[in-house]
Image: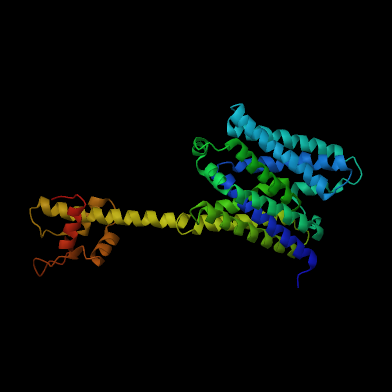
Amino acid sequence: MLNPTLITVIMAAALIGALAGVLGTFLVLRGQSLLGDVISHAALPGVVGGFLASGGRGFVPILGGALISGALAGLVVQVLRRGAGVKPDAALGTVLSLFFAGGVVLLSVAQLQPGSAGLTVFLFGQAASVLRADLLPMALVAAFVLSGILLFWKEFQLIAFDREAAFAQGLPVVLLETVLTVLTAITIVLGLALAGVVLMVAMLIAPAVGARKWVRGLGPMVVLSAMFGIAAGASGAFLSAMGQGIATGPVMVLMASLFTAISLLFAPDRGVLAQVMRRATARKTLQGYQVLEALHGMSRDHKNPAYGSDQAMLDAYLGADAGPALTQLQRDGLIRVQAPAEPEDRATRWELTDAGAAQVTAHGGWQ
């Protein structure tokens, strides 16, 4: 039977995974995956600042400070990109380095203060830092974030797929992007205790990347990404509890990455295996049509509709083994083995059927 502490951690991890999956969808679709990385790293100075300001490790001051610094970093990125004309990668890299460096400096200062030993928890996360009393505030904040998503669903959808169209319709795009950035920062801050500033970005991106391979449309992608996040969070928390001293955050990230890897490989339409099979089918179809063209052309060149070609001739024409294509074409009724002209002739020759000749003609072959 699961102990109450583990149940608390699983519930918190599932909640964080769901929120990360929802917000991560918009980051992935907008091509701003690294924005989550910036916000998560930029939360560190807010964490330390909250500790220094309050003199303790209370849930509200530390996470409040993280929210302020994370949201501020996201807004600075937007200002540099939209206002100063800095390229996106340069803006993201500059802000991430600046805020994280400031956080490390503040952490060095804070470690001289009494009661600061647990601050390093926010770098990589620690499940034991989540208490049952934290679940209700986390749930309320999560409800607030999801309400914001639902309230501006149509606007966020348009921004995610066509920012210029949103401008053309007169929407306050900059304000909406700011709201989305703040909601993302809130989600990251909630996950700091479990995943930490270093790994939280993976919980944002991995479920969304995996979900994108299975579905089309924003709604289904958001739902599936949230489900992947819930599964990764809950299973990661459970598996980490099975080992001695294993951090929860890294296991959550590994589970999210596992779901993403499965999606990349086995998704029925966009997965790697599906693409390989489509390419193989296309090559087989093309090779089959080349065989039909070769048979049709040879019969035309010899002015003999019943002219038969052996496999060696077809192999030379294709530059490859024509055997698999011949077998498939015969199965489809497009070619047949020609009856030998003389009893002692044991060579296997192929000729087009009426259906095969009609297919070549229909595709623009020799008339």
Colour scheme = rainbow
Q: Quadrant of the N terminus?
A: bottom right
Q: How many numbered circles are shown?
A: 0
In the image, taking residue 323 as reference, residue 128 lies left or right, namely: right
- Is 153 or 188 nearer to us in this picture? 153
In this view of the protein, can residue 353 be seen by the observer? no
Which residue lies at the image location 78% right of the left edge and 62% below the top edge? 244
Task: Please tell me whether residue 332 is drawn above or below residue 150 in the rendered image.
Answer: below
In the image, taking residue 249 as reference, residue 265 lies left or right, namely: left
- Is 168 or 346 nearer to us in this picture? 168
Relative image position of residue 65 (x, y in whole percent) = 78, 42
Task: Please tell me whether residue 157 is drawn above or below residue 99 in the rendered image.
Answer: below
Residue extending farthest bottom: 1
Which residue lies at the image location 66% right of the left edge and 55% below the top edge? 17
Relative image position of residue 48 (x, y in whole percent) = 81, 41
Task: Specify the quadrant of the image occupied by residue 176.
Answer: top right
Relative image position of residue 256 (x, y in whole percent) = 62, 56
Residue extending farthest front: 170
- Is 286 or 190 nearer to us in this picture? 190
Relative image position of residue 75 (x, y in whole percent) = 67, 35
Which residue lies at the image location 17% right of the left edge and 53% below the top edge? 361
Residue extending farthest top: 84
In this view of the protein, can residue 9 be seen by the observer? yes
